[in-house]
Image: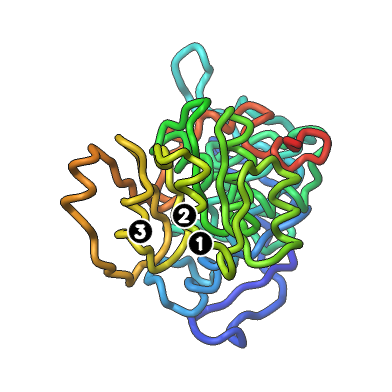
């Protein structure tokens, strides 16, 4: 099969395009003919060696993929129901997934990817392979932060920096679908209009607006229930001041960041702070994605919240 791979980390020139043997699915695995793969910052970090990680040799780059099941490995024994692994998908099913190319697994920038069925999910009708691959990592990240960590409830207010970005755009749409109010920031009029089309209730320009004043005005002084932080260097003093009583803050960026944290104002508000790395979530923590409407239905044009 044709693939993009490298034997050692380094500059982009280490990546080679060529042939590697077709993978063969073992028990509990599926073979997916890749229709689309996506590029994320973590792929760049791994290629550059910024994030030390066990890599197969040669290593196929890429974490996300969407395509069609080409083969299913043999069943593995298991209790009834279900009858072990290997019954979730059949040849011809359209699927999407992430978390490949990580922690010793091969990547997705190839004609075929072979992996445990636990890492793949059914692609909803009306969602192309390109859309599914593009939304995989960011969609999982947004969903885990909002619902596994923050346990977002209908009627609450969510704030997310960068509502037109990868994770931010999924946070906006998922929060609206869950019945929340959404405040987000952008850097241009075009991005503001895009966020409004997804249902954002309050869109602020971080270049021109007084963000703290506008957030306090929108929440009538009550504060934000869930703050989804996408910035590498969060301003915790500002954020904590804008959190509601028992507000929850999500952080998922800034590996080297060590900003000052206002401990006193944080704990007297009875707030919570969650930090997480998407690819360390277990398959069981992603069981919601096994239906055909989580989370990629949010990228289908006919299902977008208006």
Count of numbered marks: 3
Can residue 261 be seen? yes
Q: Nearer the viewer, mark 3 or mark 1?
A: 1
What x and y, as percent, mark residue 65? 67, 52
Foreground tag (3 vs 2): 2
Earlier sequence position, callout 3 versus callout 1: 1
Q: Position of residue 271 (x, y in %)?
A: 27, 40
As drawn, 203 above or below 57 = above
- Neighbours of disc 3 within 10 Å: few (<14), some (14-19), many (20+): few
Residue for badge 3? 238
**Dot 3 and dot 2 residues touching (CB under 8 Å):** no
**CA separation in Å, label 2 and label 1:** 6 Å
Q: What element carries label 2?
A: helix
Look at the numbered discs 3 and 1 and tell me whether their residues touch, using CB distance below 8 Å.
no
Give how far apart the Cα atoms at labels 3 and 2 are.
Answer: 11 Å
User: Going 58% across and 29% down the picture, which residue do you hit?
Assistant: 178
Return the residue nearer the eye: 108 or 166: 166
Do the numbered discs 2 and 1 sit on residues whose CB atoms are within 8 Å? yes
Q: Which of 92 and 238 is in front in this view?
A: 238
Judging by the rendered image, the residue that carries numbered circle 2 is 213
Q: In this view, does 112 lie above or below 126?
A: below
């Amino acid at each position: 099969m044709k693939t993009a791979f490298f034997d050692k980390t380094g500059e982009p020139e280490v990546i080679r395009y060529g042939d590697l043997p077709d993978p063969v699915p073992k028990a509990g695995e599926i073979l997916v003919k890749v229709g689309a793969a996506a590029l994320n910052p973590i792929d760049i970090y791994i290629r550059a060696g910024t994030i030390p990680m066990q890599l197969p040799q040669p290593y196929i780059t890429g974490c996300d993929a969407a395509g069609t099941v080409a083969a299913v490995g043999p069943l593995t024994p298991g209790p009834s129901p279900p009858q072990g692994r290997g019954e979730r998908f059949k040849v011809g099913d359209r699927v999407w997934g992430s978390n490949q190319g990580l922690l010793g697994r091969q990547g997705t920038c190839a004609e075929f990817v072979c992996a445990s069925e636990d890492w793949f999910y059914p692609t909803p009708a009306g969602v192309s392979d390109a859309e599914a691959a593009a939304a995989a990592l960011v969609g999982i990240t947004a969903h885990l932060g909002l619902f596994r960590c923050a346990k977002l409830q209908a009627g609450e207010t969510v704030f997310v920096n960068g509502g037109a970005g990868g994770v931010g755009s999924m946070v906006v749409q998922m929060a609206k679908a869950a019945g929340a109010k959404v405040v987000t920031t952008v850097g241009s009029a075009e991005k503001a209009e895009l966020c409004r089309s997804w249902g954002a209730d309050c869109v602020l320009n971080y270049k021109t607006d007084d963000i703290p004043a506008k957030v306090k005005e929108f929440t009538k002084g009550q504060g934000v229930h869930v703050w989804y932080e996408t910035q590498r260097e969060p301003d915790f003093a500002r954020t904590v001041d804008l959190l509601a009583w028992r507000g929850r803050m999500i952080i998922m960026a800034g590996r080297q960041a060590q900003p000052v944290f206002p401990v006193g104002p944080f704990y007297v508000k009875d707030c919570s702070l969650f930090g997480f790395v998407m690819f360390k979530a277990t398959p069981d923590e992603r069981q919601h994605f096994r239906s055909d409407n989580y989370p990629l239905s949010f990228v289908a044009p006919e299902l977008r919240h208006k």
